[in-house]
Amino acid sequence: MSDYENLIRQVASGIFGEESSLETPEGIQTKIHPLPAKKDVQVRLDEASHPLALLATRDAEEVRSFYSTKWNFPDFPHLQKLAVSILTFPQLALSECDNEFWITFSESDDISVSIPGESDMPDGFFAKYPFAAKDGILEFFQCFGGLTDWTPPPGGVFYTAQEALEIDVHPAVELFDITGWEGSLPLYKGGSGDGILIRPNGTVGCFYHEAVGIAGEEPLGEIDYTFPSLIEHFADYIRQPAEGNYCGNEQKDESPFYY
């Protein structure tokens, strides 16, 4: 097992016990706070006007009930499927990493996601990405922007609307020819540097770092998903455990979210 995998498993397993913490090789400390969080944590969140400040004062089932009511998408079955997939994780906790906070939903030490709380659409978002009004993209960014796969970064994470507004296409893609991908909306960044984006016409693309510098390979290309089908896939993907060395689960290995 790699050092990174071991770190992920240690952090996630902390959800099942008392408050725990560890430090990454880069010096970043990750903490897992049982819900409701301790008073000093609640005070820090409140003073920062963090969107999770109120939820940090509630127990795990109250937090689940809050999201169950909030995540109601009758017009967007792909978002509803994602909501149900997350809400059926049995364990909840408050995660903290590098002064950022998430509510973490977990089923086991290698099946978990974390959400930083809802956020408003920043000024200029629709001017830059008018197609975000379709297929529940707006609602996704409002409710699930910043959603992580496994524990909080440095793992895979969906961009927030503010982050998507501040970059073009995908940071790594800017180094390459993006003809045909101009105006695409950055959606997801993997821990390895891979990324997923949405074209204005609704097609979905993926940047693969492994293709960089290889003759005949294009780092950026279209994949066989629409935004709705991609989110439905992610709802299934997060329920799949990692197996063996590195991953070993074929259903996860072949996913555009894997890297």
Image (cartoon, grey):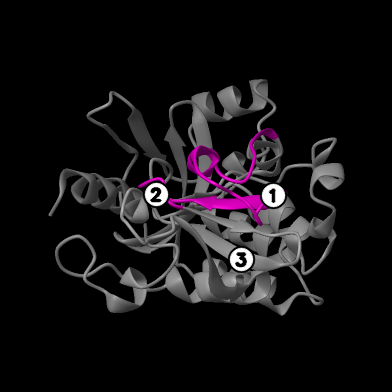
Rate crowding at label 3 as few (under 14), some (14 to 19) or many (20 or more) other CA atoms within 10 Å: many
User: Is disc 1 placed on a helix, strand or loop?
Assistant: loop
Q: Which residue is mark 3?
A: 204
- Compared to residue 24, the image places residue 126 above or below, namely below
User: Is disc 2 placed on a helix, strand or loop?
Assistant: loop
Q: Magenta region's main secondary structure? A: loop
CA separation, marks 1 and 3? 13 Å
- Pick whichever of labels 2 and 1 is earlier in the sequence: 2
Q: Which residue is mark 2?
A: 151
Q: Position of residue 141 (x, y in %)?
A: 70, 52
* Residue stretch in magenta: 166-194
CA separation, marks 2 and 1? 31 Å
Q: Which residue is mark 1?
A: 182
* Residue at 68%, 58% in the rendered image: 66
The answer to whether residue 220 is visible is yes
* Residue at 36%, 73% in the rendered image: 254
Q: Position of residue 10 (x, y in %)?
A: 24, 47
Q: Position of residue 191 (x, y in %)?
A: 38, 47
Residue 168 left/right relative to 89: right
Check contact, mark 1 vs mark 3: CB within 8 A. Answer: no
Rate crowding at label 1 as few (under 14), some (14 to 19) or many (20 or more) other CA atoms within 10 Å: few
- Which callout, 3 or 2, points to the residue nearer the camera? 3
CA separation, marks 3 and 2? 25 Å
Rate crowding at label 2 as few (under 14), some (14 to 19) or many (20 or more) other CA atoms within 10 Å: many
